[in-house]
Amino acid sequence: MEIIKYCKALADETRARLVNVLLKYELNVGEIVQVMEMGQSRISRHLKILADSGLVEVRREGLWAFYKASEEGPGRAFLNGVAALLDEEGELKRDGNRADKVIRERTAATRQFFDDIAPEWDRMTAEVLGDLDLRREIQARLSHCECAADIGCGTGDLLEMLHDLSDEVIGVDNSPKMLELAEERFSDDANISLRIGETTHLPLRDREADCTVMSLVLHHLARPMDAIREAERVLRPGGRLIVAEFDRHDVEVMRSEYGDRRLGISREKMVGWMEQTGFTVHGTTEFVVNKGLVVVLYEAEKI
């Protein structure tokens, strides 16, 4: 019986604590060790039991493995039933606080990475994209609108193009240095607003934008779906979302040299996220670029 299998998997304090954390976050083993304050071998043993039971799923990318609570199926139904009970435990709240700290440290490290490489970012991006004119391809998929937002705008490579297509442009990034470089390019343009903020907590009002762009951003995030959900929040009904993202790959150097959190995102996963967060996907186009990578452009509309 499935219920017995799930109950046995949770019949251990450590595994209950693990499930509680993984219901909220996707973490690699090193991060889980930090949160749980236990040895890696012990953590790995408990993770295997949870994964074998179907309560936890693992996403393997190159040399890394990331764990999170199962998102669907009977295992998820069981977790939905016990989640409220887990929230009441004091020890589990302490685990949650430590997990929050790990996420904050990760976010700060990512921000520092992009601050450090900001002057070289345009060159690094060009090395990967090669002959692909991503700006032109995105422009071809947009029409004139009142307000356009570039989420994760970096040094502002897309802002000028968006300015030609809209009356107002908003650029958002969490790296102060990236925004500083963007400000140098557009300091005299009152119609371009640069805002510091996280892609998962955008500094935009509900329904403020008519179209949004996320170009090679989501693979840097621990929870890309949260960023897509935020894009839906800030778009008006019928608004357009254009996402450029690497297809799933195994090029480990993208993690070590370019700060990627994920080695791309599969088309199936991306389309699923968009549909779950209130978008209709109208088309995808793929482009082969350097380093054996494939860039996929997604065209979607807010329902």
Image (cartoon, rainbow, N blue to C red):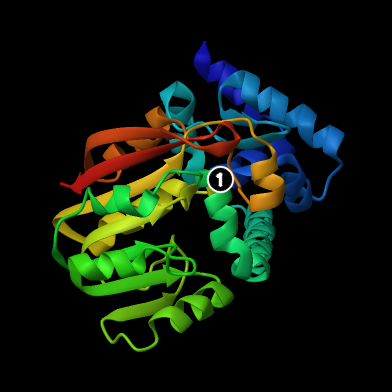
Say few, some or many: other residues with alpha carbon within 10 Å of mark 1 (under 14 / 14 to 19 / 20 or more): some
Is 147 above or below relative to 1? below
Which amino acid type is marked by label 1? Answer: Val
From this view, report whether residue 284 is shown above or below residue 220: above
**Residue in the image at 38% along x and 49% along y:** 134
Q: Is residue 87 visible?
A: no
Which residue is drawn at the image coordinates 47% and 66% (left, top)? 198
Q: Residue at point 55% right, 71% down?
A: 175
Q: Where does the image place residue 44, in percent across and percent down from the top left?
A: 78, 31
Camera-side residue of 133 and 217? 133
**Total numbered labels placed on residues in the image:** 1
Residue assigned mark 1 = 128
Q: Is residue 21 left or right of residue 44?
A: left
Residue 200: percent from the left, percent from the top? Answer: 44, 60
Q: Based on the displayed image, in which of its 4 quarters is residue 249 positioned?
A: top right
When asked about the image quadrant of residue 115, the answer is bottom right
Q: Residue at x 74, y 30 (%)?
A: 46
SS type, badge 1: helix
Instruction: Give the image location of residue 248, x and y in percent.
Output: 52, 31
Camera-nearest residue between 219 and 139: 139
Extreme-top residue of the structure: 1
Near-viewer residue (295 or 226) = 295
Q: Position of residue 32 (x, y in %)?
A: 72, 45
Q: Is residue 7 visible?
A: yes
Tell me: 299 left or right of 45. Answer: left
